[in-house]
Structures are given as C-alpha cells and as structure tokens.
Amino acid sequence: MDIGKRVAREEDWIQGATGDWEIVLGLEVHAQITSKAKLFSGSSTEFGAEQNTHVSLVDAALPGMLPVINRVCVEQAVKTGLGLRAQINLRSVFDRKNYFYPDLPQGYQISQFKHPIVGEGEIEIDLPEERVEKIGIERLHMEQDAGKSVHDMHPTMSHVDLNRSGVALMEIVSRPDMRSAEEAQAYVRKLRTILRYLGTCDGNMEQGSLRADVNVSVRRPGGELGTRCEIKNVNSIRFIGQAIEHEARRQIEILEDGGKIDQETRLFDPKTGETRSMRSKEEAHDYRYFPDPDLLPLELQQEDVDRIAASLPELPDEKKERLMTDYGLSAYDATVLVSDGARADFFEEVAKGRDPKLAVNWVNGDLFGALNREGHSLEASPVSAKQLGELLDLISDNTISGRIAKDVFDSMYKTGRNAIEIVEKEGLRQVTDTGAIEAAIDEVIAANPDKVEQVKTKPKLAGWFVGQVMKATSGKANPQLVNEILAKKIDIPSED
Amino acid sequence: MAKNDELIGLTLAEARDKLKAKEITSAELTDAYISEMEAGRDLNAYVLETAEQAREMAKASDAKLAKGEGGAIEGVPLGIKDLFCTKDVRSTACSHILDGFTPPYESTVTSQLWRDGAVMLGKLNNDEFAMGSSNETSFYGPVTNPWRREGDDTKLVPGGSSGGSSAAVAAKLCLGATATDTGGSIRQPAAFTGTVGMKPTYGRCSRWGIVAFASSLDQAGPITRDVRDAAIMLKSMAGHDPQDTTSVDRPVPDYEAALGQGVKGLTVGIPKEYRVDGMPEEIDTLWSQGVEWLKAAGANIKEVSLPHTKYALPAYYIVAPAEASSNLARYDGVRYGLRVEGKDITEMYENTRAEGFGDEVRRRVLIGTYVLSAGYYDAYYLKAQKVRSLIAHDFRQAFSEVDVLLTPTAPSAAFGIGEKSDDPLSMYLNDVFTVTVNLAGLPGISVPAGLSKEGLPLGLQLIGRGFDEETLFRTAHKLEEAAQFTAAPEAWWRS
C-alpha cells in the first residue's frame, strides 16, 4: 500500500463539533552534521565556545572569500542517506538561498535546492503495542547554519554571534506520512537513534543539534489533504507533541467555524503551549535560488558510496531483529534496548555466556531504573557491564539469591565495588548447608505448633514458613532448599 | 628626469633582466615610478599610493638581488587593481560601501606576485565593483585616459572596469598592473590605451581574495606594455589554489617560452558574426589588416561561424547581474565598511545600501534580483544559461577547425568622459566582442594594432582554446611584431 494514503487509526482521530478529524504531519528535521570543521570553512564546530571565536574569514563573509566543501560532511551525509535506505545522488548541486538577516553574513545560505545529495528513502517507527509504521523520506540535503542574534547585551542594539555560522546541517524532509503527535514524536526519536548509530549527528536537541519544522494540516479521515501550516524550529520531542496538538485543534476550530486555513509559518511558544503566526504566504521570502557559482557541482564516485556503505554499522532495525533471533528476546525488550546503541551493546556484554532473559531484565529493569532515578547516563553508570555480569553469575551459581542480588546491586551502584567483594564483606553468601537450614526450620516449627496445624488445611501458609526461615537466616537461605526441606518436615497438601 | 625617463622606458622584461644583471636597482626603479605616480595624479589612476611600502619592498628585493637571489620578477614595481584585497592596505573595489575596509588577508594572485619578488606601488582605480566599461562609476571619480584625440583636449575614458590599470600602464606609472575581466574589463581598457590585456581561461588564476562581481565569469589577468610582459606576469599570477574550488589544478607553462614560436601552420579563425552593424570602418580595416599580418606570418586563415554571438550580450547582462545581486548582499552595514543607521535593521540596510552603492551598481543589483525572482527565473536566468551553453558549443565547434580566433577587441576607440554615462545600453555595447569569451570561460588577449583616424589606439583580440594561453601568446607576439605599434601618448599630465 502507498504509505502516504494511510488513514489514522480511529483512536487517533480528533473529535470536533461537526465530526471526526485526522491530522496529517510532515517533518523537516535539521540535524547538525558531526564534524570537526564547518561545511565550507576550517572553523571549529565546538559547542559553547566564547562568542565569535570560531569564525573564519569565510564565515564572516569578508570580500573575496570563497567556500571550499568539507569532504567529511559529504561522507556523513552519504552515510546518513544510506542509513535511511535512501537513494544517493552521485551528482548534487549547491544553490544560494538569498535573504537578508544580520546573522546571515553572506546574505545567502548555501543549500541544496533542486539537486539534493540524497533522494527518497524510508524509516520504520516504533509505536506502543508493538505497532510499526513506515514513514517515507523525501530527501536529505546539506546546508549551512546561520549565526545567532543576541538581543540582551545592549539596551537598543542587537549583537551577532557567528560561531554557528556555516556549521553543516542536514535537512531531512519526510513525506506527510504521520497521523498523530505520537507518530511524529516516534519519528523524531527513531531518526535521532539512527543518526546516533551512524555517528553523523549527536542528536542533542537542547544544544540545537537537532530541531524540527513541523508541517501540520487536518482533514476528514481519509479525505482530501488540507492546507498546512509550518511550525518552525521546535526543539524538543515534548514540544513537538504539544505544538501539533495545539495547532491541530486551532485548525479544526477555524474550519468548523466555516473559516479556512491560511498557509503560513508559525512559531511555537513553549511558555503558553500555543503556536502563533510568524509570517503569511504573502510575506514569504522570494529566496531567488540559483546554483552557487563559487562551487562546482558535487560529484561522487559509486566506489566512494560503496566504501561508505561497507563501513555502515548495524542499524537499530537490524540490531532488533538480531537480538530477537540470537537471544530470544521479546520485541518489546529488543525495541527498548536498541533505542540506544550503547544500551544494546551493554546488554550484549552482560548477556555474553549468560541467561539473556535474566540479563535483559537486569539491564532494562534494575540498571536503567537506577540510572533514571539518579539522573545518570549509561556512560556515567557506576556499574559496568562486566560488574553486572559478575553479579548475574553469583545468582546463577547460587552464591546469592535473586532477592539478595538486589541489595548487592544497590550497594554496587552506590560504591562502584564488585559484587563478590560486597557479598564476602557483608557475609551475604547464600546458605546451602542443609543442616543449618533444617535447624532453622525446626526452630520455626517448634515455635509455631498452631501454624503447623493450620497449614494442613491452608496450603498457602507454606509461604509464611518460608518467610520465617528466610528472616531467621537474614535472607541468605537458598529458597529452593528451604522449600524442599520444609515439604519433608510438614504435611502440606497439594494445591489442587 | 633623464635617468627617470630611461628607467620608466624599460619594459617589464627589460627591467627584470637589468635588475638581475645588477645594472639597475629596484630602489631607483621604484623611486622613478613613485615620482611618475605623483606627477600623474591628474589621471586619477591610483586611488591609493603606497610609496613607503614600495620602498621597503624594493629594498628587500635589492638585498636578494645583491646576493644573486630573488624570484622571477624580483624588484619589479606593479600597480594593483583595487578589486584585489591587499593585506593591511585599504581595498574598497572603489565603492563607498567598503569605506576604509582594510583586509587582514592578501589575495592569492597578489601574494604570488610578492612571492616572486614584485613591488607594490599602490591601488589602482576601477569601476565600482568592476561594473562599468569606462571607469566612470568609481566612487573615487573617473580615470582619464593618457591618450587624447589629435588636436583635441577632451578627456577620454581609459575603458573599464580596469581603467586605472590600463591608464597607469599606458602613462608608465607602473611596469605592469593586475586587472580583472568579467565581460571585457581587461581587454577593452587595454584596447583603449594601446596596452596589452590578457584574460586567461576561467580557473587559471585563483579568485580568492578578489572582490567578487560575477563569480562564474570573473578572472584575473595582467595589463602590460607588451605581449612578453603579459606572459611574464601571468606566469606569476596563475596557478591552482585549494581555496578556490573553481581554480584548476594543472601546471602553469612557461608562457614566455611560447613567444617566438611563430604562427606557421596555425589556423586562425575569423568569426563572421563579429562583423556587426554600425561598426566604424577603421576597425573593420584594422581587422582585415590583422588577417593579412597573420597570413603573411604563415598562418592559415579560415572563416568560421559562431551563430549564437548575437545572444551573448543580453545573456551576459542577465547572468552577471544575477550573480552580482547575490555576491553584493554581504555589504549590509552589519560587519564592516559603511553603515548608515536607521530606525530598525531593515531601514539600516536600505540606508546603507542606498548611500553605499552608486547608480550602476544599484541598477545591476536590481536587474539581478529581478531575473532571479520567482516567475522570472526560467524566462531570464535559465534561458541565459542555455544561451551560455550554446555559445560555449559554438566555440568548441570553431576550435575543432581552427587554433585561434581573431576579432576586434571593442567596437570603437576610447570615447569622452561623460559621453555615454547617461546611456547604459550604448555603454554595454562596448563589451559586444569580449563577453562571449567570458561566457565560454576561454582565454582572450587584446593587442594594440593601430591608431584610429583621430590618433587613438585600437586593439585586436585573439581568443584561444581553454588553457591554451601559449598559442594566444605566440600569435599575439606575431601580431605585435607585425603591427609595430610604437605610438605613445604625449605626457601632457606631467606638465
């Protein structure tokens, strides 16, 4: 089926006063290319430097300066195109997009308009309940970022910081294939994951390395496409959701009141959660695109594309597939793991030679629970994959019980020490000495003759005995042995 | 003065040889030119004299020459068109909008000249942003041609846009000058002043550090007293530059060595479409004379057709302004040069650009903006680019039959200051024989070949295959020999 013709699921429809509506969404994501130098100059791209310290003569557009393409950025764009399973165009052309703005020193942005480096592609997005949708990619092109206007340094003047001026961006344009805010958010997440796997963009939305222009329109479910509005520069996944929800409702209200949507560019205000008009179609710039005569068309050799293709890392979808096949993981567990390449790698190190189900529960559950609680990144985790693996080994060889393992893990997380060290020092080794367990059981039985009577008719009370024994052994008794010996000592009827 | 006359009478090649032979010093040569520059200020050829710097450079050159060291043109004093950015020396492209702009960098072409030992005398006048054919659009005022009509004191233009360069070379205010050519700006001024002007193949010289007019057409080259001097200067100016991706990575030949090879066996093409209506008969006659000279020197002559020639001028006046409108967007008052305040940013832009740009520049920015606008792009810019391909194709066809083309350089001799400045169209017609070469990216050279009835110099143009400057120099040298152009303007400006 043509993915563009998909109609939203009924639960994603928005109920208006006059009936149901469907949202149609397309995204233009601007992703900063990971590279040391800018797209057309040797200046550093490092984030957070002092204002106007990463500015070359080219970036400041001094007279007679000329752009020279950074080959690393080209390779990164090709790599991204391949990661999006997209057409790589061996010939692409840089155009000038002309407009005046103080933070645009050349008076034009060098971009690829008619002939982008990457053509059509496709990605799969992962949604709740294991729903997967295909989203079409229309194109990817390279362009320069602008500088930044700074308005708070002087009462009447604005300042300009050109550190970002000329930094390489990829604009990744989707087809209007998304049908809900949730899908748009999943799209950005998935795109970000792919970019991070490829190492072509760090995906850091707070620092502006990834931002999205969201095209929103509404229609009757399955009907003719409506007029769209473009919401510029939304810089968090949460804001993308809010902006879409608000914008869709705004449009529906207008339509239901008998109005019509004006095609325009809008801004999302995170403070109010609303979008407001930035400029109408009539006010839209005439960018006067034409091929940049300072740059020859960008020609790639098929061998270069093949070489880059051969160097591609395993991508999230392939990794998910492999984790499910090789480790027998559920789709859910695998999806959670591959959402971050480092997380999947961590899992694989823990799971090596161990029970994968145990490993995934500990990685996705305990470890990430602690990391999220403490606000740590995986890179900053006090417990390494090797250490977590050793803890799992102690569970598997019955040195400690699963219950004790939780305490040992907490201690590891706090101190960074190894599991065995904690177990030895705290004397947490599981009691597997049947004599000692028997003695403990005998003591509990002797002290609770009434319970011994009751258990004969209430088999559920067996658990109470186990609990008492564990309590008496500070939780160190092997629960399986306790069950076995207890069964011999008291008469517990079978539950059926 | 006698000693000075002797010194400034030397060609670049002669001066180079005498410097190497230690018969003269760069210091005395440079001083001679500094006094000529001062004496010639009425010509307004220089917009900035850098005498002090020149003397220092000359001194350094002499130290090298004394040790038998130094580059190919060690100690040779040159003038530099103001379009070239020169480190720590004001460079304004003769526009008000670049008031006081002093670049912290040196253009590749000039840095190569200094590398080879040249001495900078100063910055030469040009049409504002190289837009013009008479050097009348300069913010620093027009340049006066050293040549005058016989028995007539009317001030004439030196051609443009490299009018300061052509006037300075013709008046011997420097040994040679850098120039740039977007539609004829080296060759037409050379023709108007009895000098040699060489526009090399697009990509032969780096554009890095030269204020851009129309990037796909701009190319640097020399204006000199004779063909040999042009060959020597181009050798230093040319070469691949990784900072200009449109410059081409191929070796720079020894152009001087190509001189004297003669034209025997070469086929010279005569494009019939260059015989335009209303062209003065004396230019037609000179052209025929040129044919005879080359034939006598052993060349074969063949008439060829360049059928799309008539579309070249309109196509040029679309492509060049289109690129210029975008190239000049950076002059916005925000970072350097002139700023005229306004109540907000838009008004500041408007005020700055209205005051900073002259009429001709504004005219071209408007034309360029118009032809790139939505709805007009296909009809103008795209169509002009198609014409451009057809013109390049015409030349390819012609060069499959001939080795070099011979044409007049300009449709007239130098005209009076103010005569055409109110009529842009008749001004643009000056470029009718030269723009085709820029549109096709080919090399062209103008050689002084005779005088008009009124005693003004006239030039003939040779056009070559891409990167075949050697054949051009070789043919130009033969033409020069045959023409025996020894006329010189009377040095009226010195009195």
Image: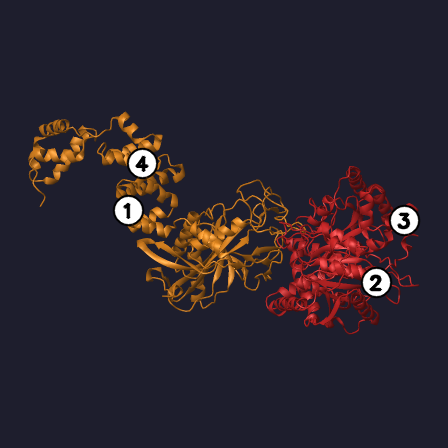
Q: Which secondary structure, mark 4? A: helix
| Quadrant in which the N terminus of chain A appears | bottom left
For the residues marked 3 and 2, what is the alpha-carbon distance in whole angstroms?
Answer: 24 Å
Contact, mark 3 vs mark 1 (Cβ under 8 Å): no
- Evaluate whether residue B83 shows in this view: no
Q: Which secondary structure, mark 3? A: helix
Callouts 4 and 2 in the same chain:
no
Callouts 1 and 2 in the same chain:
no
For the residues marked 1 and 2, what is the alpha-carbon distance in whole angstroms?
Answer: 90 Å
For the residues marked 4 and 1, what is the alpha-carbon distance in whole angstroms?
Answer: 18 Å
- B113 displayed left or right of A58: right
For the residues marked 3 and 4, what is the alpha-carbon distance in whole angstroms?
Answer: 92 Å
Residue type at mark 3: give it.
Answer: Asp
Callouts 4 and 1 in the same chain:
yes
Residue tagged by mark 4?
A: A388
Location of residue A71 in the rendering, given as x and y in whole percent from the top left corner: 54, 50
Of badges 3 and 1, the one in the foreground is 3
Q: In the rendered structure, the residue with mark 1 lies on which chain?
A: A
Residue tagged by mark 2?
A: B483
Mark number, residue A238: none
For the residues marked 4 and 2, what is the alpha-carbon distance in whole angstroms?
Answer: 93 Å
Mark number, residue A327: 1
For marks 3 and 2, the one nearer the N-term is 3
Of badges 4 and 1, the one in the foreground is 1
Chain letter matching colour red: B
Residue type at mark 4: give it.
Answer: Leu
Q: Which secondary structure, mark 2? A: helix
Q: Indicate the colour of chain A.
A: orange
At a point 72% along the width and 62% down the height, the residue shown is B183
At a point 90% along the width and 54% down the height, the residue shown is B491
Residue type at mark 1: give it.
Answer: Tyr
